[in-house]
Image: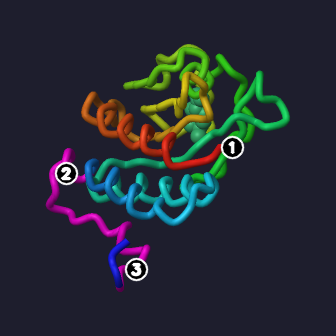
Amino acid sequence: MGEGQHHAEYSNYQGDLSKEETLQLLVDSYEAVSNDTRNWVANLSNASSLVWHAYHSLKVPVNWSGFYVINPTKPEEELILGPFQGKVACQIIKFGKGVCGTAVSSQKTQLVANVNEFPGHIACDGETQSEIVIPIIKDGKVYGVLDIDCLALEGFDEVDVEYLEKLVTKISESNDF
Ligand code: SME
């Protein structure tokens, strides 16, 4: 972090940046603010905020951005709610269930243009229309997922996949889970 720079300034994305520039700034900002610690609670909390503000600067109506992590009391079975921005959400998601559980079981990003067409989608908020979930993987093991919900249909596309996968790679490298 630069001398004299305040942490909160990383949440101030300029409105005139392209989507690619904004999402690259998101990745770079995460890298800068995560330098101080390898604690996942601290880093995923700031990552949730950076994601929220990046999409709002792009006028994408994101209504939830955050993380589910492997539940330490049931590590073979389920995710538990982690740091996030937005409304109160479901606490437990079983592997293989919903978009998040599917991302864990398949170890693949889930890009969902219309959540109403995703079999088994878990509606924490009935207003959500589209969603993207990226698994956090290190050495072949899943540690959690980044989940972003949107009030618009087709809120995310392949550009989001590209940059959010970069972000999640940085998250997997910069934390001790
Ligand atoms: N929709 C998710 C559940 C989590 S909330 O969106 C925050 C799912 O189907 O796994």
| Picture coordinates of residue 81, whole percent (x, y) | 68, 43
Q: Residue at x 15, y 50 (%)?
A: 18
Q: Report the mark closest to the observer, 2 or 1.
A: 2
Spatial separation of the CA atoms under disc 2 and disc 1:
30 Å
Whether ligand 1 has any atom under 8 Å from the Cβ at mark 3 is answered as no
Of the image marks 3 and 1, the number of the one nearer the N terminus: 3
Callout 1 crowding tier (Cα within 10 Å): few <14, some 14–19, many ≥20: some
Counting residues from the start of the chain, the first of labels 2 and 3 encountered is 3
Q: Residue at x 51, y 60 (%)?
A: 46
Establish if 101 lies above or below 53: above
Note whether ligand 1 is within 8 Å of mark 1. Answer: no
Which residue, given by chain and number where applicable, does mark 3 sit on? 6
The amino acid sitting under disc 3 is His
Residue of label 1 = 81
- x, y (%) of residue 25? 27, 55
Q: Secondary structure at mark 1?
A: strand
Inspect the magenta stretch and tell me whether residue 80 lies in it: no
Front-most of residues 163 and 147: 163
Q: Quadrant of the C terminus?
A: top right
Residue 101, above or below 4: above
Dot 2 or dot 1, earlier in sequence: 2
Residue 120: percent from the left, percent from the top? Answer: 61, 17
Magenta-tinted stretch: 4-22
Badge 2 density bin: few <14, some 14–19, many ≥20, Cα 10 Å: few
Type of amino acid at the residue the image marks with label 1: Leu
User: Is residue 133 visible in the rendered structure shown here?
Assistant: yes
Residue drawn at point x = 53 percent, y = 20 percent: 107
Give the percent coordinates (x, y) of residue 171: 48, 45
Label 2 belongs to which residue? 21
